[in-house]
Amino acid sequence: MISHTQTPAEDAGAVTPASEYRPQAPFLDELFELDGTPRPAASALVEQLRLLGPEGMIEAGRRRDAIFMQQGITFETSGGGGSSHERPFPLDLVPRVLSGQEWRDIKRGLAQRIRALNHFVDDVYHAREIVREGIVPWRLVASCSHFARAVHGIRPPGGVYTHVAGCDLVRHSDGTWKVIEDNVRIPSGISYVLENRAAMARLVPELFASYRVRPVDHYPQLLLSALRSVAPSAESEATVVVWTPGPANPAYFEHAFLARQMGVELVEASDLVVRDDVLYMRTTRGLERAHAVYRRLDDDFVDPLEFRPDSLLGVPGLVRAYRAGSVAIANAFGTGVADDKAIYCFVPDMIRFYLGEEPILENVRTYLLSDPEQLEHVLARLDQLVVKPTGESGGRGVMIGPHAEEEEIERMRETVIAHPERWIAQDVVRLSTVPTVGEHGVLQPRHVDLRPFAVFGERIDIVPGGLTRVALEEGSLIVNSSRGGGSKDTWVLEDGDDADRAGPPIADTQPPALPDLRYGAWTGQQQQQQQEHHQQQQEQPAPRAAG
Amino acid sequence: MLARIAHELYWLGRNLARAEFTARAVEAVFQAELQGASDTKPGVSFGSGGLLAMFGDVDESERSSQALGQLTLDADRPGSMLASIERAREGARTVRDVISAEMWEAINTTALGLRGGGQPGWAAPAGPYLASQYVKERTALIWGVSNRSMLRDEAKCFLDAGGLIEVSDMVLRMLRVALPSADAAAADGHALILLQAVGGFHAYLRAVTSPPNAHPVARFLLFERGYPDSVAACVDSLHEVFTAADAGPRNSKPVLRVSRLAADLDFQRRALPDGAELTGICEGTQQELARIDQDVAERYFAGAAAAGLRR
């Protein structure tokens, strides 16, 4: 358990070079050993950071904000009095480094987990074997807020439900990775992974000097080919669209980003129409068919005929078209049942049940409050646990016991007793820290988590790294960007031992010989030459080659 | 492409062109009004009052000194450069996946630069001039980037179409406001300001031999196909882009109507005697353009309009 009182860094505020950076025990720091010496893999990076110095960091930060404002990579924060204003996305300039070996373990673990979750969604809407085996109680499944009766018995093309998944990982102080949350509805953040990398390469190219970092920018193509592979299309090329709730949505930047990067249309509900169980979009040339929809809004809103009848963002008849198999939806309707926090506890059992394997990535220890015994245990230690609502995401409604006020805990106690089935409790995880640029450009330890993004089409592909979210306030464990969190570029290092590594480096190929450059200039001398040449040609017609 | 997107691109083009044209006109009037009356008798009347009239403003009480300021950075005035750019930015944000990232950045940066009173120094008397310069440069950059970075597909067609129809509308508005009425046709003084207000002074000098008096200038701005901002050139280009964007151009109302207008302008250029009255032609052409705008909305954006979109 972490201590309530954080020892403030003794030298906070003073201008300290990176070499005097001090990790905060008992948390694991990913770049430094506890005694303040850089870890072997990070030593070159630490040296570069030292050369940059606080001034260099501040300067690069200023350029970063200007660039992000110009590019419109912003998010809106609501200030006092309901006014909101745009702020540049807070990217921290110190990258997080993962070794190739570490990443391979994470990747295998995630692929396993996502496969199991996909099996689970299929099972819940079909045979319910896992319920009959007594592993997951049906009562719990049916009470999930994202359980969708409307899609019972529908099996999408390829049997894939969770096309896009992002599991939140944390690193415990003993170095092990644990899954803290599964996101298989509409996980967001991938656009920031790509934009962060692009910005880092522009702002602090010197940091990349000693490293071969695995690229991330192929994600949109992975997603597109996954969507094409599940689209029910007899024609050669399926039409894929990204469906956004509209420009007012906080994640609109990402929706537009993905549509642009994939080269597909970004549609709103008013662009879509269902005729005879087939989905069309309204174009300048009349109605055109759409085969696969990457939707970025919740089940509740997608179809007023089947889900919430008051939804203005939905397309009437979409679920019927989906049921008829004329359109693929990613992620499939009803997947939310698999990322409910009450179901999370059962994921290790799912892996054993469906795949017959032992889970590679562990869960954080979680208490189901609908169980009276566990509830009693939790109520006794509310001030030491994290309490989360089951059907929410984005850090809403979360209470962190050790950081909460007395009355907040008491209020939570009443709420939990009233509706225990809507809450879970988890042990507080000692999130690892990574040096982060603080005030005056000085590096300070800040807590991080990691959200890798997986794409499930014909196979599961996971982009190297993912979104590292960082709590920008000292001692804070909350990394959500809506609540003052920032992000970091995540580097997965190439160690020449990965099967799906990219091809040979560019330098290996021999460039072809090119003709010399020509420069056009019309000088007096050339004019004269040209005239003489012309005259010569007129006097004696060009001689034919002898022989 | 999506009807809604086409609609947004069309208006993006219109808003950009409007901002640019406003900037050019403000700059010309600003410079003209600083100087005294010229020695030779002016053949047209175009000052800040005329400028306001061009934007459909009939309020006589507010005049000159405020006019230029209102047309530059007044966010509450829908005709101001700032308002046009802000609308363009809103539109660009909606179609961010269709236009290139570079183009979005160019538009966004322009809006950021104009907000909150613009750059330091713009509060000075020279403010309208500096702001106009800025908008001129930025819109030139935006169009340049769009020409270089966007695929020449339907999206580009609708963007260009919006720009073209707006430019010809603005030129016609200016001519209608500035040209002397039919009975005063005898007073044919110089009309330099009209050329300066569209940035066509240099092109005129190279294309036309007669001095820049009201009639030759008006003819140039209406009929000269070699000058890209003339009405005839815009209408020709409109025909091209609609033909390219339309699935069945041979029986498409907007294409047919534009085609007729182009032929009509060409006929008038050849048939009209020198010194003939032109205001009637300006009015007729403007009305025809309004009908084309309507046809475009019906044929291409019908889906979007039916869904209850704004505008």
Image (cartoon, coloured by chain):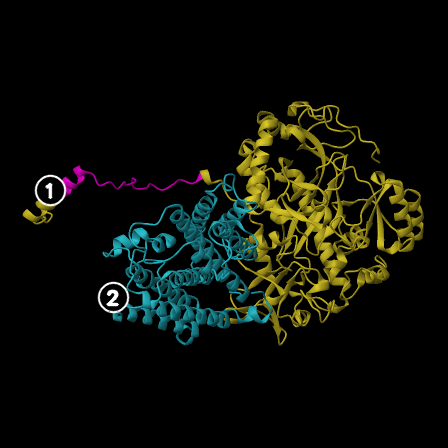
Residue A132 visible within the image: yes
Chain A: its colour in the image is yellow
Q: Quadrant of residue A223?
A: bottom right
Q: CA distance from mark 1 to mark 2?
A: 49 Å
Disc 2 marks which amino acid?
Asp
- Judging depth in this view, the residue of A293 and B310 nearest the camera is B310
Disc 1 marks which amino acid?
Glu
Q: Whole-percent x and y of residue A505? A: 49, 40
**What's the chain of the residue with tag 1?**
A
Span highlighted in magenta in the image = A508-532
- Judging depth in this view, the residue of B56 and B168 nearest the camera is B56
**What's the chain of the residue with tag 2?**
B
Which residue matches tag 2?
B274
Q: Residues within 10 Å of mark 2 (few under 14, many from 20)?
A: few
- Quadrant showing the N terminus of chain A: top right
Q: Is residue A27 above or below residue B54?
A: above
Chain coloured cyan here? B
- Judging depth in this view, the residue of A22 and A452 nearest the camera is A22
Q: Is residue A376 above or below residue A235?
A: above
| Residue A532, disc | 1
Q: Whole-percent x and y of residue A482? A: 71, 46
Q: Residues within 10 Å of mark 1 (few under 14, many from 20)?
A: few
Q: Tell me if residue A251 is in the magenta stretch.
A: no
Q: Whole-percent x and y of residue B5? A: 53, 62
A164 horizontally vs A537: left or right: right
